[in-house]
Amino acid sequence: MRRYGKHTDEDDIRSRPNRKGNRPRTHIRPKHEDAAEGMVLTVDRGRLTCLVEDTVVMAMKARELGRKAAVVGDRVALVGDLSGNKDTLARIVRIAERTSVLRRTADDDDPYERVVVANADQLAIVTALADPEPRPRLIDRCLVAAYDGGLEPLLVLTKSDLAPPGKLLELYGDLDIPYVVTSREELENGDAAERVFEQLEGRVTAFVGHSGVGKTTLVNALVPQERRRLTGHVNAVTGRGRHTTTSALALPLKGTDGWVIDTPGVRSFGLAHIDPSRVIHAFPDLEPGTEGCPRACSHDEPDCALDQWVTEGHADPARLYSLRRLLATREQTEGD
């Protein structure tokens, strides 16, 4: 066996030839400084539909991103074929830092959280006042997810012709949540869309609600033609159709720079990932009172400093009750 001395010349060292003739692997990743900026509109079977300027482009995630996944609403950098022509495919090489995230778990025992939407400003929680009956526990859970993820909530109550909204609105009055009340007739003739539109201009709004409440009907009225244009592009590329409510889809609001993101109907909204210390940020009148709380305080225990804060008159007791009611949803099911 040949032994090399202390001052061996590099040219004297044998190297194993590359039999395949391709380039050797490297850990240095390209910077893609010329990548185009875009927004993810929908995700379907590993293919991501993106908007690059005014062109709808189909893309896939680049290998260098590893396990990092892009979701609807993400701002991304793309390279490759950006023509948007049929059967073309670009690559997503970067995902920008998110300003907000809407997350959920399948249930409260599931440790794996799923990011549903990124970079939304607002969460529109659509619920019917009757047929089906409203589910306050599910609304509470959506509110907690919104506060935790940095989204402002909006209540959209439908079918007011079947039941009055007063009782449900009273439950959320102390939270100062903006709301819109609509009827079935208003959903059908477009009046509901006009009134909801006023709350959406210039903002990215994710819509959430369970089946039968009129969510998709409302979204279609807000963005006529856009769903058909974008889903038609997806079908042409994948060769397979998918029902529009089975995956989140971002749609531009005509005449404004706002966006509507329609999400699939939910049966449950798991909160296993929620941290109480983040939810408190949505209660600026209560947050200063937490300075005297014990470490990892749940804000619903004997030593919680919020009780003293409210007793001293710094905040309304109803606000503390509302906070604790929302946090309690992490320990209860929607049907409780």
Image (tube, helix red, strand yellow):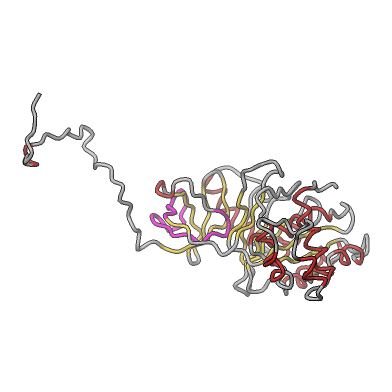
Quadrant occupied by the N terminus: top left
Query: Residue at (80%, 47%) from the top-left corner?
Result: 332
- Measured from the top left, where is residue 127 in percent x and y? 81, 58
Query: Residue at (84%, 66%) from the top-left corner?
Result: 182
- Measured from the top left, where is residue 96 in percent x and y? 48, 61
Relative to residue 320, is residue 259 drawn left or right? left
Relative to residue 191, is residue 92 drawn left or right? left
Residue 182 or 75: which is nearer the viewer?
75
Relative to residue 95, is residue 28 drawn left or right? left
- Measured from the top left, where is residue 228 in percent x and y? 63, 57
- Measured from the top left, where is residue 29 in percent x and y? 33, 52
- Segment tinted magenta in the rendering: 71-93
Query: Residue at (31%, 47%) from the top-left corner?
Result: 27
Residue 259 or 113: which is nearer the viewer?
113
Residue 99 or 244: which is nearer the viewer?
99
Most distant residue in the top direction: 1
Is residue 173 placed above or below 127 in the rendered structure? below
